[in-house]
Image (tube, grey):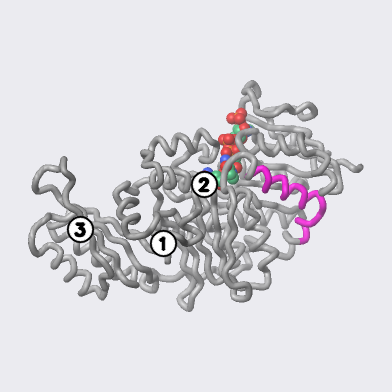
């Protein structure tokens, strides 16, 4: 059988999984690719580190030039992560006429136009299934299988680390810090886990999804985002009392006002499919005009699920399929129109609000008056007694669920309420996804 030489950049969580599949499943992968894969070079930072895979035929090196300057290498698999020097390395690989497979959503979200422009210039392809949803084939689904549709909306849980933390906090009452440590040990988190918990990783993935679903060149900075790093356990508990779980959602909706994008911890009704997505699992709900409602579900982070997507891409590249979809999809093209983003005044949702209020007569009425003057209708109210160990006179939590309201009105009302002198600011505001 004909052979193809491949260079692997990075042998961490994802790279190790990729190497394992290439060694242990070599026959099946060769059958499906039509060529035997020869993993020739593996590039790492520390050549002395103990690795979780035996590589009898590959050479472990620290210099990317070994891959870039080897004319036999036809495909570079990038699992190093980060932006620099990864961007420069990927651009050089493409200029050296090598196709690239990457799991790096940060690179695509921030430099997709440069990377894809370079690939087009040199007639090469870039495959990136593992960049969103780990092992879930969502890139293939949006780029190919749902091509007949205008996607109308997306609602997605796409950060395994955050979903793992929220599940542990909700179900076992695990403290945030220890749940995050466990997610890091299990290989779900980014090298810098701040990217996970502050919503940046989810925003990167939403930028990639928006490219595929709406042909929209979106910069991460254009996506309003909030992470789970400032979420309080009390809000997870009160949401539970109201029949909701809190999930970090990536949301995209197309309407007459434009494309609405956001990343935020959001209340999701218990018993709905997204509410039941737990641990490192991800799910992406896609509504298309022809297909209607669809849901893609699976492991969104971790070694082998991610490696499954990377090696699937490698098979597609080697078999020649990627070249066709790469050309026809024409992603991250400079020629695509700049999308019109929905202004905050046109964003509507139900909202969960929590105020820490002085427990005395008239306070609830003053809050309700502000909400009323901004056109916000209250659906339900819960006021909790202070805890037994709280000193007398401590502020008490007041939780309000609104009916559908304009975000602009909610923001104006919160500013006014936080200035009233009867609440201990800042108040909490979370959107609700029914
Ligand atoms: P990781 O465990 O930190 O592994 C990174 C690997 O790259 C390490 O082997 C490291 O070498 C090597 N490396 C980093 N910088 C290098 C440089 N300048 N030169 C040479 N080698 C370098 O990261 P990971 O979790 O596998 O993630 C890799 C990529 O996959 C990231 O883009 C991430 O966003 C993406 N991703 C990860 C997951 C996941 O579940 N972890 C899922 C989907 C996508 P040493 O081992 O010598 O330090
Ligand atoms: N850090 C990412 C996550 C890896 O937790 O989802 C998968 O992209």
Q: Position of residue 276 (x, y in %)?
A: 48, 55
Q: Identify the residue at image location x=66%, y=34%.
A: 16
Q: Nearer the viewer, mark 3 or mark 2?
A: 3
Dot 3 alpha-carbon crowd within 10 angstroms: few under 14, some 14 to 19, many 20 or more: some
Work out how far the residue at label 3 is from the one at label 2, CA to CA, in angstroms. Answer: 33 Å
Q: Earlier in the sequence, mark 1 or mark 3?
A: 1
SS at circle 3: strand
Q: Earlier in the sequence, mark 3 or mark 2?
A: 2
Nearest the viewer among 262 and 9 is 262
Is 76 above or below relative to 255?
Answer: above
Q: Nearer the viewer, mark 1 or mark 2?
A: 1
Nearest the viewer among 82 and 282 is 282
Is 91 above or below relative to 409?
Answer: above
Most common secondary structure along the magenta stretch: helix
| Residue where numbered disc 3 is placed | 383
Residue 319 in the figure: left or right of residue 424? right
Query: Disc 2 beta carbon < 8 A from ligand 2?
Result: yes
Residue 21 visible in the shown view: yes
Query: Disc 3 beta carbon < 8 A from ligand 2?
Result: no
Residue 378 lies in quadrant: bottom left
| Residue where numbered disc 1 is placed | 269
Pointers 1 and 3 in contact (C-beta within 8 Å): no
Residue 217 lies in quadrant: bottom right
Q: Identify the residue at image location x=8%, y=62%.
A: 361
- The answer to whether residue 60 is magenta is no
């Amino acid at each position: 059988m004909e052979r193809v030489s491949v260079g692997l950049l990075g042998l961490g969580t994802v790279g190790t999984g990729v190497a394992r599949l290439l060694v242990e499943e070599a026959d099946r992968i060769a059958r499906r690719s039509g060529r035997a894969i020869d993993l020739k070079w593996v590039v790492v930072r520390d050549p002395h580190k103990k690795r979780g895979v035996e590589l009898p035929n590959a050479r472990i090196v620290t210099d990317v030039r070994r891959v870039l300057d080897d004319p036999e290498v036809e495909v570079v698999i990038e699992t190093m992560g980060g932006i620099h020097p990864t961007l420069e390395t990927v651009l050089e690989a493409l200029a050296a006429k090598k196709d690239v497979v990457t799991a790096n959503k940060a690179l695509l979200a921030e430099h997709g136009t440069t990377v894809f422009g370079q690939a087009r210039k040199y007639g090469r392809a870039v495959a990136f299934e593992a960049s969103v949803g780990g092992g879930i084939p969502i890139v293939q689904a949006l780029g190919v299988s749902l091509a007949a549709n205008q996607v109308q909306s997306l609602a997605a849980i796409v950060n395994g680390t955050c979903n793992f933390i929220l599940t542990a906090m909700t179900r076992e009452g695990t403290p945030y810090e220890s749940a995050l440590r466990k997610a890091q040990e299990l290989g779900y988190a980014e090298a810098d886990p701040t990217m996970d918990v502050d919503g940046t990783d989810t925003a990167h993935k939403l930028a990639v999804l928006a490219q595929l679903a709406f042909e929209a060149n979106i910069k991460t900075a254009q996506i309003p985002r909030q992470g789970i790093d400032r979420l309080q356990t009390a809000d997870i508990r009160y949401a539970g009392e109201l029949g909701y779980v809190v999930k970090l959602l990536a949301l995209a909706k197309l309407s007459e006002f434009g494309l609405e994008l956001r990343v935020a911890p959001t209340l999701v009704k218990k018993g709905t499919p997204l509410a039941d997505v737990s641990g490192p699992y991800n799910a992406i709900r896609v509504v298309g005009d022809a297909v209607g409602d669809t849901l893609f579900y699976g492991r969104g982070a971790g070694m082998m699920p991610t490696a499954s997507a990377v090696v699937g891409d490698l098979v597609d590249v080697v078999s020649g399929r990627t070249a066709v979809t790469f050309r026809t999809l024409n992603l991250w093209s400079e020629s695509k129109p700049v999308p019109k983003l929905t202004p905050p005044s046109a964003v509507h949702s139900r909202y969960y609000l929590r105020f820490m209020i002085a427990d005395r007569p008239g306070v609830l009425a003053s809050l309700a008056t502000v909400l009323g003057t901004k056109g916000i209708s209250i659906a339900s109210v819960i006021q909790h007694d202070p805890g037994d160990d709280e000193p007398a006179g401590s502020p008490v939590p007041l939780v309000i669920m609104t009916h559908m309201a304009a975000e602009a009105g909610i923001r104006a009302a919160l500013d006014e309420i936080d200035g009233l002198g009867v609440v201990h600011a800042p108040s909490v505001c979370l959107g609700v996804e029914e």
